[in-house]
Image (cartoon, coloured by chain):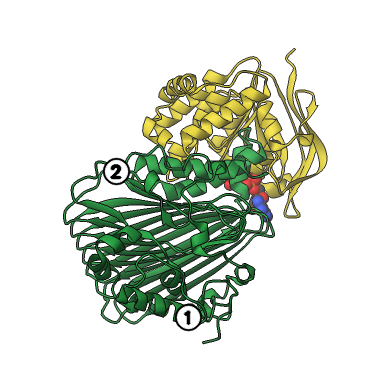
Amino acid sequence: MPAPRTIPFDYPVPSASPAPALPGDGLPWLDALRGEGRRLSAGGLPGTRTEAWKYTSLAPLTELEFSHPAATLTEAIPAELGPGAFDALEGPSLVFVNGRLSARHAQLDGLPAGLRVRGLAQGLADDPAGIEALIGGTEALNGDLMAAFNAAFGADGCIVETEPEAAGKEPVLLRFVAAPGSEPLAYHPRVIVRLGAGSSLTLIECHEGPAGAPTWSNPFVDIRVGEGATLSHVKLQVEGDGAYHTALTKAALAGEARYESHLLALGARLARHEIHVRLAGEGADCQLRGGYMARGSQHIDNTTVIDHAVPHCESREVYKGVLDDTARGVFQGKIIVRQDAQKTDGHQLNRTLLLSPKAEIDTKPELEIYADDVKCSHGATAGEPEADQLFYLRSRGLDLRTARKLIVQGFMGELLEEVGHEPTRAVLAERVAAWIDGGRS
Amino acid sequence: MSKPMLAIENLHATVDGKPILNGLDLAVNEGEVHAVMGPNGSGKSTLAYVIAGREGYEVTEGSITYRGEDLLAMSVEERACSGVFLAFQYPVEIPGVGSATFLKTAVNAARKHRGEQEYDAMEFLKLVREKRAALGIDDGMMRRALNVGFSGGEKKRNEMLQMALLEPTLAILDETDSGLDIDALKVVADGINALRGPERAMVVITHYQRLLDHVVPDKVHVLAGGRIVRSGGSELALELESRGYAGLGLEPSAAA
Ligand SMILES: Nc1ncnc2c1ncn2[C@@H]1O[C@H](COP(=O)(O)OP(=O)(O)OP(=O)(O)O)[C@@H](O)[C@H]1O
Ligand SMILES: [Mg+2]
């Protein structure tokens, strides 16, 4: 493997300087995990010679010198962010500022029976053995560099658990806010989601940040959906235009489990949303829906790996986006069908509307199929809004701008229709509409 | 004497460099309904698209005057807002765009252009309900994406609903009757007749007499080889019905 880039950030390299104080320091298993994270990440971020990062260069990130995590401790949400996108929603919520749980913003009153939500740093103090059981050893890093950075430098995060058969009515909201000071800011929250058998939950992850400031958020979301359980995982990424967002979500599905991912990515200068799903029990069902909208010189990457490990599972991926100006999109979709995974049903679709001749998308589907009785397919389209559609709408009196707007809205709207929780869908739809209004034509 | 609504003179148009319309003349006065018939591929839809202003349909010679103005100088949406409406032979599917949202946007665009107050949601709902009922369109269709998955007949009825709401001055109906069942044909014909009036005009493109049984035209034209080769009264359509284009010596080759 080609050597990853070395990055000059002032996070300590093992043995060079003493590690910064992080919650849970001194717990032997955690020290081991962080040590392994540091060891793996010491070489720096992955470069474009690494196959999985071929289309997305983190080079600009390597020019930033990030401030020490302790220097970024704050609970103040930048005023310019205004109210949170999901503020009007009912239900429990946690707010993280610069990756740290803000106790004063937490709303955990009246959690329904069978639902448990707690902060990771607090958990390490109260229940280290319980957290150890959840995080496990170092194998979870599995050679994944971004997970290694997260393990090495992550200070906080949360744990969301459901008991068997529990059904949360309202979604659980996790809001991640960047509140940068004068220095570049990095944070690495870790979210652990465990759904008991037969339970169901809607989880909303929202990433926000102010315009301009250089920030790097590197969340790692580790999900296990128990037998027959259903997780609807909504994510809205609206970080500021100086932000780098590198997210890794790993989900493992037991038999008959269902995992739905609904992503809407609008923000950040560069964003990568990487999702790995392992269908580990028969009858599991994975539905990934991703929407991305980018303009200016934004770069937006969606990378998915779906691993069909057992027979009779279904996976569906639909990623749709709109790119304007010189924005660049990347979609990499890998589907692995293991030898045992007969009767796998896997489909993948990537569609992009290009609103400017200089916008670009790289789509790389990859099917790795080792079983013989499977149905797998992939498709991709990219192009301008169709002339037929524009003409039809204009022939009804809509000006070009309004016609384009309707087409774009419809294109993205199709994705959102599948978000089950109506108020959440409405918030996402509003964001799409606002994005469109923020464009010139 | 009624005033001219549409005057097309010596119209030549090409598509992808291929000449389709070759010196077409057509004059329609206010209050009139004209039928245009003609063999497949003779240029009827091309004429409709040129009037509506579709990109890629290049006028190389001639003129189109609409209510005394140069229609060809107007953008697609200007034409629509000043009262030109084309009911498409093949209505276009617009995924994800709700029919109701679209209708409201379209109607308000025209009202805004005329300097009228835009409808609010309630007023508009009421208006649509009324027009919809007359055309036998159920509410379910309104909630679906525009034309997506509509049957052929549903698409045509939806075109008529748009026409009823937009109340155009000049309507070009391109084979609105094809794909309709017998009852729907009657409903659509009633819709067309309801819009007939002294300030309006229509050009009805059709292959069959049956629509013209309900919507009796003032004039009938035969388009062949990109020109009007024969014009007459409503009896011309009946004559065509019994003898065909060949029987009347109006094959494109004969016409050229
Ligand atoms: N993009 C194009 N490139 C080349 N030729 C075209 C194009 N579009 C239309 N034509 C040709 O123009 C001619 C006229 O087509 P048009 O659709 O106007 O016919 P029409 O009279 O409406 O036929 P129909 O009765 O079948 O609807 C046809 O020969 C058609 O093949
Ligand atoms: Mg035609």
Instruction: Using the image, determine if residue A354 lies above or below residue B39.
Output: below
Which label is found at residue A170? 2
Residue A8 in which image quadrant: bottom right
Q: Position of residue A237 (x, y in %)?
A: 49, 53
Please say if the residues under marks 2 and 1 sit with CB atoms less than 8 Å apart: no
> Is ligand 1 closer than 8 angstroms to the Cβ of mark 2?
no
The image shows a total of numbered marks equal to 2
Chain displayed in yellow: B
Disc 2 residue type? Glu
| Callout 2 crowding tier (Cα within 10 Å): few <14, some 14–19, many ≥20 | some
Say if residue A419 shows up in the picture: no
Q: Is residue B42 left or right of residue B59?
A: left
- Residue closest to the far left: A165
> Is ligand 1 closer than 8 angstroms to the Cβ of mark 1?
no
Q: Quick one: SS at disc 2? A: loop
Chain displayed in green: A
Which chain does tag 2 point to? A
Q: Residue at x 47, y 28 (%)?
A: B188
Q: Residue at x 67, y 34 (%)?
A: B77
Q: Nearer the viewer, residue B116 or A295?
A: A295
Q: Residue at x 36, y 55 (%)?
A: A233
Q: Position of residue B99 (x, y in %)?
A: 47, 36
Which chain does tag 1 point to? A
Residue A154 in which image quadrant: bottom left
- Residue closest to the far bottom: A1
Instruction: Using the image, determine if residue B82 lies above or below residue A27.
Output: above
Picture quarter with the C terminus of chain A: top right
Residue marked by disc 1: A14
Q: Is residue B46 left or right of residue A361?
A: right
Q: Position of residue A141 (x, y in %)?
A: 38, 76
